[in-house]
């Protein structure tokens, strides 16, 4: 049975996890708006440049991640679950958080090196990258694949898809 201290720990941990994922997935525009580092006209011009297809992909991915997190949190809070099941759910939450952080780092790297908006999704040993660009060159795709592969510990199957 879970005592009050454990319940509070799980509750606070879940809150911190949700907030950290929200922070990681927060766009740079929103973060700068919160911190007050940028004026309003610059925010408007940056938001117009964002590709609506990439935004739709991000929203869909965020919804899937949120559903997974809720299911894992339900397992953690369920008093009928064994400690092994709870441990597996906790590890899955940590993996989910780590994967989301890696995806964001990869998107930031593409933005920094190639000045391209992108959406990165990691699933098992596959990385799918969607690039918002009118330039659909194989050379650019190969360079992006090499850059992303250098960020990975093991060989991954990387695909690059261009969207206008």
Image (tube, helix red, strand yellow):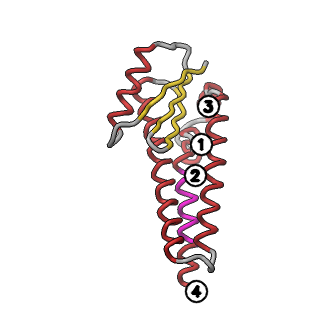
Q: Which residue is mark 2?
A: 22
Q: Quadrant of residue 18?
A: bottom right
Q: Earlier in the sequence, mark 1 or mark 2?
A: 2
Q: Position of residue 107 (x, y in %)?
A: 47, 35
Disc 4 from disc 1: Cα separation: 42 Å
Disc 1 from disc 2: Cα separation: 11 Å
Residue range (magenta): 11-23
Q: Earlier in the sequence, mark 2 or mark 3?
A: 2
Q: Nearer the viewer, residue 149 or 24?
A: 149
Q: Quadrant of residue 75?
A: bottom right
Point out the frontmost of discs 1 and 3: 3
Q: Which residue sits at x=61%, y=25%?
A: 49
Asked if the stretch drawn in magenta spans residue 14, the answer is yes
Categorize mark 4 by other alpha carbons within 10 Å: few (<14), some (14-19), many (20+): few
Point out the frontmost of discs 3 and 4: 4
Q: Quadrant of the N terminus?
A: bottom right
Q: Which residue is mark 1?
A: 30
Element assignment for label 2:
helix
Disc 1 from disc 3: Cα separation: 16 Å
Q: Earlier in the sequence, mark 3 or mark 4?
A: 4
Q: Which residue is mark 3?
A: 54
Q: Earlier in the sequence, mark 4 or mark 1?
A: 4
């Amino acid at each position: 049975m879970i005592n009050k201290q454990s319940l509070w720990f799980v509750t606070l941990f879940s809150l911190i996890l949700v907030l950290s994922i929200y922070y990681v997935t927060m766009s740079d525009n929103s973060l700068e708006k919160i911190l007050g580092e940028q004026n309003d006209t610059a925010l408007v011009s940056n938001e117009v440049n964002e590709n609506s297809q990439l935004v739709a992909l991000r929203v869909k991915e965020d919804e899937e991640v949120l559903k997974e997190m809720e299911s894992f949190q339900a397992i953690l809070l369920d008093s009928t679950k064994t400690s092994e099941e709870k441990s597996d759910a906790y590890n899955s939450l940590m993996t989910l958080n780590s994967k989301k952080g890696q995806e964001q780092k990869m998107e930031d790297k593409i933005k920094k090196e190639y000045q391209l908006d992108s959406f990165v999704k990691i699933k098992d040993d596959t990385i799918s990258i969607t690039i918002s660009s009118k330039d659909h060159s194989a050379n650019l795709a190969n360079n992006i694949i090499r850059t992303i592969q250098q960020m990975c510990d093991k060989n991954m199957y990387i695909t690059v898809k261009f969207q206008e």
